Image: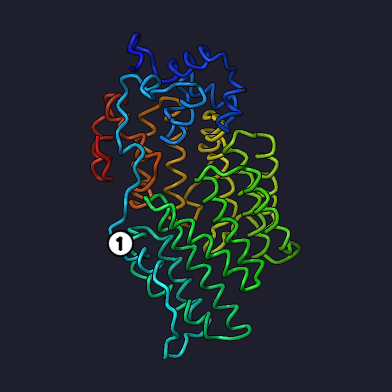
C-alpha cells in the first residue's frame, strides 16, 4: 500500500526520502536514470516538476519503490499530462505510410523539379501560421505516392533528385506524426527518410535525415553516444568550406549533438558542440536562415534556451530568453516552440504569471504546435489548480482551447 504517513510532502521531498532510504547518492541515481546530478537535485528541490510517466516509472524502479503513489502521494496524475493527442487526419497518413504499391503505375512520373517545387511549398505551409498539421495532412498522401512513383521510374540524376524530394516528404511526415500516439510510425518515417537519402547518394539529404533521426532517438531515450555517432558520421560527409547548404547542415548536426548531451545532463560537451553550431551560424551571417531546416542565428540562440532547461538551469535559460528575438526565426512553428521553452523555464522557477503569458503567445503563433506539445499538456493542469490566482482562469481558458482536460 502507498505510504500515506505524510500527505503534506511534495513530490520532490518524497523522491529525496525514497533515495535516502535506499542509501543512494544523487550522482548514483542520476547515473542509473541517465540524467545529471543537477537534474536529481532539481527534482528533489522542486525546481523541476514531476517527470513524464516513463521516467517516473524508471525513477521509482531505481529507488526501489514498488508503488509509484509512494512518490506522487495525493498528486493527481491526469492522463492528459502524459497522453499524446491524435490529429483528426492521422488515419489518412497512417494508411499512406502503410500501403505498399507493388505494381508500377501507367502514368508518366512527375519530373524531379516539379516534385521539388511541391515539397518546397509543403515546407512553407509547415512553417506558416495557422493549422499547419491540418494543411500538411491534405498534401502528404499524394506527395508520398508521387515521390515514390518518380523515384521508382526515373533514372540517373533525375532519380536521385526524386529520392531527395522523397526523403524530405518523409521528414514532413515525421514532423506531422511527432507528439502523437504513433511512435512506430515516427520511427518508420525517419528510417525511410534515411534509406532513400542514402539511395540518393546525397550527403546533404543524409545529414538532414540524421538531424530528424536524432529527434527520434532523444524522444525514445536512446543512448546519447548512439545519437552523437550518427550525427558526427553524417557531418563527416559534408564539405564546409564555402557551400551554405552544407555549412547549415553541418551546424545543424553539431546542434543535434549539443542537444543530445544536454538531454542527459552532460554540460561540458553540450556547450562545446553548441559553440560549433554557433560558429557555423556566424559564418552564414545573421540574416541567414535555411528555407526549411531553419538553421541560422535565431535557431542556434533559441536552442540554447532548451539546453539550459534540460540542464536544469532555468536562471540561465531566462537570461537567454530575455535576449532572444523570436521574430527573427522565420517559422511560426519554431517561434511557438521557443516561446513554450521560455514558459518552461519560468515554470521551473514557479513563475506562473509569466508562464501562462508565454503559453498564450505560443498559442497565438501556432495553435497546432502548442496543442501537441507535451510540456504544455503537463503544465496547464497544474497552473489551473495551483498557479497564481490572477492567472488560473487564463490557464483554464487556454487549456480548454487546446483540449487539455483540467
Q: Quadrant of the C terminus?
A: top left
Query: Percent x, y for residue 310?
Result: 54, 35
Q: Nearer the viewer, residue 163 or 191?
A: 191
Q: Residue furthest top?
A: 5
Q: Give SS at disc 1.
A: loop
What residue is pinned by disc 1? 89
Query: Percent x, y for residue 73?
Result: 34, 19
Q: Quadrant of the N terminus?
A: top left
Q: Is residue 85 above or below residue 157?
A: above
Q: Is residue 229 above or below residue 340?
A: below
Q: Is residue 380 left or right of residue 214?
A: left
Q: Residue at x 49, y 62 (%)?
A: 171
Q: Is residue 392 above or below residue 86?
A: above
The colour mode here is rainbow
Q: Nearer the viewer, residue 214 or 358?
A: 214
Q: Is residue 137 left or right of residue 151?
A: left
Q: Residue at x 62, y 22 (%)?
A: 27
Query: Percent x, y for residue 291?
Result: 53, 64
Q: Residue at x 54, y 61 (%)?
A: 191
Residue 281 visible to the viewer: no
Amino acid at each position: 500500500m502507498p505510504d500515506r504517513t505524510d500527505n503534506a510532502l511534495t513530490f520532490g521531498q518524497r523522491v529525496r526520502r525514497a533515495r535516502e532510504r535506499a542509501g543512494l547518492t544523487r550522482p548514483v541515481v542520476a547515473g542509473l536514470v541517465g540524467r545529471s546530478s543537477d537534474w536529481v537535485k532539481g527534482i528533489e528541490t522542486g525546481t523541476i516538476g514531476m517527470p513524464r510517466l516513463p521516467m517516473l516509472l524508471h525513477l521509482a524502479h531505481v529507488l526501489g519503490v514498488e508503488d509509484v503513489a509512494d512518490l506522487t502521494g495525493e498528486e493527481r496524475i491526469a492522463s492528459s499530462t502524459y497522453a499524446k493527442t491524435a490529429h483528426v487526419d492521422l488515419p489518412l497518413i497512417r494508411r499512406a505510410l502503410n500501403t505498399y504499391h507493388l505494381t508500377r503505375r501507367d502514368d508518366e512520373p512527375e519530373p524531379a523539379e516539379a516534385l521539388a517545387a511541391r515539397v518546397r511549398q509543403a515546407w512553407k505551409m509547415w512553417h506558416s501560421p495557422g493549422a499547419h498539421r491540418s494543411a500538411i495532412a491534405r498534401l502528404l498522401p499524394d506527395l508520398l505516392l508521387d515521390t515514390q512513383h518518380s523515384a521508382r521510374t526515373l533514372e540517373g540524376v533525375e532519380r536521385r533528385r526524386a529520392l531527395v524530394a522523397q526523403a524530405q516528404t518523409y521528414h514532413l511526415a515525421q514532423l506531422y506524426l511527432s507528439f502523437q500516439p504513433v511512435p512506430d510510425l515516427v520511427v518508420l518515417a525517419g528510417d525511410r527518410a534515411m534509406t532513400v537519402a542514402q539511395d540518393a547518394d546525397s550527403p546533404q539529404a543524409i545529414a538532414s535525415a540524421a538531424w530528424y533521426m536524432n529527434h527520434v532517438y532523444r524522444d525514445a531515450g536512446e543512448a546519447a553516444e548512439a545519437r552523437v555517432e550518427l550525427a558526427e558520421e553524417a557531418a563527416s560527409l559534408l564539405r564546409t568550406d564555402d557551400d551554405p547548404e552544407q555549412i547549415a547542415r553541418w551546424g545543424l548536426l553539431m546542434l543535434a549533438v549539443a542537444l543530445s548531451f544536454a538531454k542527459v545532463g552532460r554540460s561540458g560537451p553540450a556547450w562545446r558542440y553548441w559553440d560549433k553550431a554557433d560558429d557555423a551560424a556566424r559564418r552564414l551571417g545573421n540574416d541567414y536562415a535555411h528555407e526549411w531546416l531553419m538553421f541560422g542565428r535565431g535557431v542556434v540562440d533559441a536552442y540554447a534556451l532548451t539546453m539550459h532547461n534540460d540542464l536544469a538551469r532555468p536562471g540561465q535559460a531566462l537570461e537567454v530568453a530575455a535576449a532572444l528575438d523570436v521574430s527573427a526565426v522565420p517559422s511560426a512553428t519554431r517561434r511557438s516552440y521557443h516561446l513554450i521553452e521560455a514558459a518552461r523555464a519560468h515554470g521551473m522557477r514557479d513563475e506562473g504569471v509569466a508562464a501562462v503569458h508565454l503559453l498564450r503567445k505560443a498559442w497565438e503563433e501556432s495553435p497546432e504546435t502548442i496543442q501537441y506539445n507535451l510540456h504544455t499538456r503537463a503544465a496547464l493542469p497544474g497552473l489551473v489548480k495551483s498557479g497564481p490566482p490572477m492567472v488560473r482562469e487564463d490557464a483554464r481558458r487556454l487549456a480548454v482551447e487546446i483540449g487539455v482536460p483540467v
